[in-house]
Amino acid sequence: MTTCVDIINTLSPCLVRAGWNADVANLLSLLLGVVIVATVPLLTVILLIWIERKFAARIQDRIGPNRVGPYGLLQSLADALKMLTKEDITPSGADRILFNLAPIITFATVVLIWAIIPFTPLHIGADLSIGILYFVAVGSIGAVKVMIGGWSSNNKYALLGAFRTIALIVSYEVPMILALLVPVLMAGSMGMQDLTRAQGGMWFIVMSPLAAIIFFVANLAETGRSPFDLLEAESELIAGYNIEYSGFKFGMFMAGEFMHVFTVAVLTAVLFLGGWWGPFVDQLPALGFIWLGLKTAVVYLFMLLIRNTVPRFRIDQVMNINWKFMVPLSIVLILVQSFLLRLIDALGLRPAPEMANDLLANLPQTLVLLAGNLVLGAIFMHLLQRHGRTLREADEALAVVKGEAAPSGGLAEA
């Protein structure tokens, strides 16, 4: 398996034989491994901005960027150059060290996650045995950069925006982490490569669609995208915690957001869609890049579709969806999934290790797990519908007493 350590071990002897000092050769090899892991996200941002603007334009019956370069492909580069030439403004009274540190943390946390993403059976930055734990730990740093940016700006709107964003991020980390336990239980490992290899016979999204939905929605909220884009509620908070940032610093916040969304799409593909698994990968491992890219593209475009079609929720609606629906559902899902896995072992439905990548061998356990997810989802939707009906009837009764038209209820109010 090719990792950054392998790059160091293969390149360093070559440099030493060429006459380089051993310590210098190791340092250069280490830097090369870091550059390889970090370069892909940095270059991807430029293309992601163009894709998102074109996709939004098609949905809104517009043309999108089409002037700078063929099909507007160079528009993102022009915008980046413009940001570099903008004046760098630091508010009076701001904590300069923390104020300048927040944009760096924003992008660094996203790039660090890419170190554990398996691109093919042979290519991964660092194949950690605790890859899931690493992802959760690094992803949690995002809450720190929001608080640092809002507090150090010496602006009440930035501070209030940071408080509201932190409330959202911390709240939705609970169901996200609980949803991550499901693939860990099914694979018996926290390593990202192990989780991917465990889906050779059947994707985890088929075995546990509820866990995939919870993980996807929770990460959609953590990225601050619609309908959870509370930090961009201009009518209430101007622009949220980063209102005082300008020029290149604001550009780092924007690039970090775009990269975070794409990283969520990659992780969803790895954890629930089989990652690099696909036809002929066993014969040609490099095809893993293509299969992972196609699955990531599907998830990413679906996220863009949600952003451009679903209206923003209120802060109370966002909290209700999380604490009254997603958290209880994720807790019950963990219990049900654990019980079903023990039941599968007791009935001997789990495929033998040599048959782990066989579709038919995985079919019995898949049907059991899928049935449990469907039953659990139906029960929760029934409870949610009944609760929403109760709220609607209460609103209608109150409206009759006041002689007014009854407001319409909805999922968020429930």
Image (cartoon, helix red, strand yellow):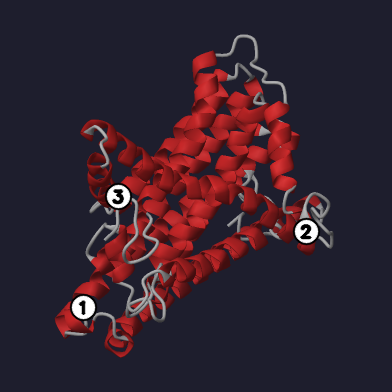
Picture coordinates of residue 192 (x, y %)? Answer: 32, 59
Assess whether mark 2 and mark 1 are in contact (beta carbons under 8 angstroms): no
* Residue placed most toward the observer, 52 or 327: 52
Quarter-of-image position of residue 195: bottom left
- Number of callouts in the render? 3
Query: Regarding mark 2 in the picture, which secondary structure is present there?
Result: helix
Judged left or right of residue 45, residue 14 is: left
Residue drawn at (36%, 38%) of the image:
31
Picture coordinates of residue 144 (x, y %)? Answer: 45, 31
On the image, numbered disc 1 is attached to which residue? Answer: 343
Q: Earlier in the sequence, mark 3 or mark 1?
A: 3
Q: Label 1, label 2: how many angstroms apart (C-alpha)? A: 55 Å
- Alpha-carbon neighbours of circle 2 within 10 Å: few (<14), some, or many (≥20)? some
Judged left or right of residue 58, residue 271 is: left
Q: At label 3, which amino acid type do we have?
A: Ile
Q: Quadrant of the N terminus?
A: bottom left
Q: Label 3, label 1: how many angstroms apart (C-alpha)? A: 44 Å
Q: At label 1, which amino acid type do we have?
A: Leu
On the image, numbered disc 2 is attached to which residue? Answer: 71
Query: Regarding mark 3 in the picture, which secondary structure is present there?
Result: helix
Q: Earlier in the sequence, mark 1 or mark 2?
A: 2
Residue 386 drawn above or below residue 79: below
